[in-house]
Structures are given as C-alpha cells and as structure tokens.
Amino acid sequence: MPIKTAFKTEIEHVSILDEHGQFDAKLAEGLIPDDDLLALYRHMTVCRHLDEVAFKLQRSGRMGTYPQNMGQEATSLAAAYVLEKTDWLVPCYRENAGLFWRGVPMEYVLLHWMGDERGNAIPRELFCTPLAIPIGTQMLHAAGLAWAAKYRGEKQIACTFFGDGATSEGDFHEAMNFAANLDLPVVFLCQNNFWAISVPGKIQCSAPTLAQRGLAYGMHCVQCDGNDLFAVAKVVKEAAARAREQSRPTFIEAVTYRLGDHTTADDARRYRDQAEVDLWKARDPLIRLRGLLKEKKLWNDSKEAELLEFAEREVAGAVQRAEGIEAPATTEVFDHTFATLDPQILKQRETRRTSSLGQQSGRSASHAPAGGSH
C-alpha cells in the first residue's frame, strides 16, 4: 500500500500591536474601542503599581511570599475584557489584572498573600475561582465548571490560565483530554513566560510551540503575542465563540515574559541572563499600549502623571483595607469547616481546647487501660 499523509496542520501566530509600535488596524478593527482602550491602559497601570507596593509589603514583613504580575498583565486582562461577565475565570496566581477587571477587590489578593482565607471568598456573582497555587489543578476545575454548564444547557464557558511549566503536569493532560473528548466549552490559556521557576522552556517542551500540545487532543490551537492586548483579545474572543457555539475547547499559547522573579522567595538572577530580561522589558505590554495611545493623540505626559497619582491612591486604599480588616474569630475554623457540629467538636469550639481527643465518651483519661490510650 502507498504511504499517505495521516495528519497535517499548521498553527497561526497572531500579532496586532508589536513592540516596535507596528499596528495592524485591519486585524484590530472592532476589537477595542478607544474609550475602552484608555480604560484598559489605566487599569494595567494601577495593577502594575499594586505589584510594586506588594513587593515592598513583603520585604517589610507585612505580607508573605508574593508573585509579581508585571509583564504578563495583557493576557488575563484581554481575556476578562472580551468574555461575558458570567463566564468563569479560573486563574493561577498571576492574573490580577483580569480578576480586578472582573470586579474582584484588590484587597482580596493582598489578603490571600497575607495568609487570610477571606481573600479567597470571592463573591459568587463575579464567577472567579480563588487563586490556584498547586500547578495545574485549576485546569481540571475549569473542565468541571464547563461540563456542569453544558449539562445544564447553559451558554456559560470557562477560561483557565496557567504557565508553560503546567503543561508538563498530568492535570493539564487530563483536563485537555476530558475537554476535547466530551466537547466541553473551555478556553485553555497558557501564559508561556519561558521559565517554570528556574526551569527553561526548552526543557519543558522540545516542540517548536507549546500550542501544538493541544493537537494531540484534537482541539483548535493558536499562538499569539501575549504582550499584545489586541492579539490576546482577538484569539480569546474567537475561542469563546467556538466554545459557546460549538461546545469545543481551544488551546491558546500566549507568548509573554515575567519581568520579575518567580516570587519574592526567588532570585531569578541566578538562572536568567540580564540581556534576556532587558530584551523583554522593551516588549512590555504597558509600554507598547502607551505608545499607541500617544500616537492616537489620546494620551500625554500630563495624563500619565494624573494616572500615577490615581494609582497610588487606589492601591493605598486597598492596602489600608487589607491591613485594617478585623481579625478573624477563632471559631471561624469550625464554622467554615463543618456543616453541623457534633458535641465533641462543639466543646472544642467553645473551650478552644482539644483535651477531649483520644478519650472514650463518658470516661476520663485516668480510666484508660494501662499501656496506652484508645
């Protein structure tokens, strides 16, 4: 029998506004009106300032470990902008811009990194899940949320975010497999920032793109410039339509870069060349968006100064609310863990003691048989 081609495909790379200021007005047509573009730029600037303040909070001992978002703001923000407000945002831990755009108060993220669980109690009506620290687990959550929406006959979809390192996790492959085989309305948005903490992307994947990992599951795959707000908005908008109208998942690889350390517990200078960092600083999504606004005569230095003052006030307010929140009651660990409290648990809640543990009901420890307790 003759040899024939079993499968052939190609993966597009989408770029609309590059780091040199080149803007494809035709591809951008109808994507983001100027008024919204201004609002998105202001929002990104506030988020960047929060990053700077959060870093100082950690360094001064007022907050725990914190992962800066700077350099990656365009991905989650563009997605949150084009998705419906009832679509699920299922984040990792570098999606502040998207979460804040959806309406999550800034202090919630600060509370999370301060170790206060109330930062994870995101209002249900915002359709955002809490930050996911374990790598890859949130993709399974997104598949489950989309599955539930499909089962109920709703048009709601789920969009989940993760890094390049997460594509090496089993959870990633399980979520992709379920979503593709069950025709689930999920958008998988990989933020390829080239570093899984200190592990470079070339060790994570030997293929030319991460996007092609989705081909094995039979789903549509696309790569885009993750620092280009327009490009991300375009591919997410198309993926959302595919999910909503065809109930099919999409795998998006957004090529981006984290300008800071992995977290404040990391020192990226130990494994990254400064020349590489400097290269990506010139590709900063904020810089290119500001350049476009100036070219459109929509922005100037005076407006920039006003915006920075506004950002300082907004972030200062969020910090004040996070640090000024009333301390949680010791009873809350019981109230939010158990639906009903049995007598022993109720006693622990009231006395704040666990002396009853390990004792038989109705008997004191002194009546326990010699040789050990029950």
Image: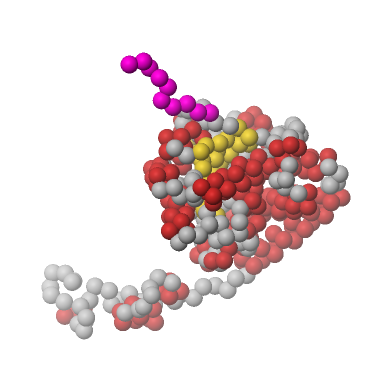
Q: Quadrant of the N terminus?
A: top left
Q: Position of residue 121 (x, y in %)?
A: 52, 66
Residue 4 falls inside the magenta stretch: yes
Instruction: Please tell me which residue is depicted at 42% across the width and 22% down the height of the picture.
Output: 5
Question: Is 283 or 352 nearer to us in this picture?
Answer: 283
Note whether 99 is above or below 359 in the view shown.
Answer: above
Q: Quadrant of the C terminus?
A: bottom left
Q: Is residue 208 left or right of residue 27?
A: left
Residue 125 falls inside the magenta stretch: no
The quarter holding residue 268 reads top right
Q: Residue furthest front?
A: 1
Question: Is 197 or 16 nearer to us in this picture?
Answer: 16
Q: Position of residue 83 (x, y in %)?
A: 61, 53
Q: Position of residue 223 (x, y in %)?
A: 57, 35
Residue 118 visible, this angle:
yes
Question: Is 359 or 247 nearer to us in this picture?
Answer: 247
Note whether 229 is above or below 122 in the view shown.
Answer: above
Q: Residue furthest left?
A: 370
Which range is magenta? 1-10
Q: Is residue 300 left or right of residue 218?
A: right
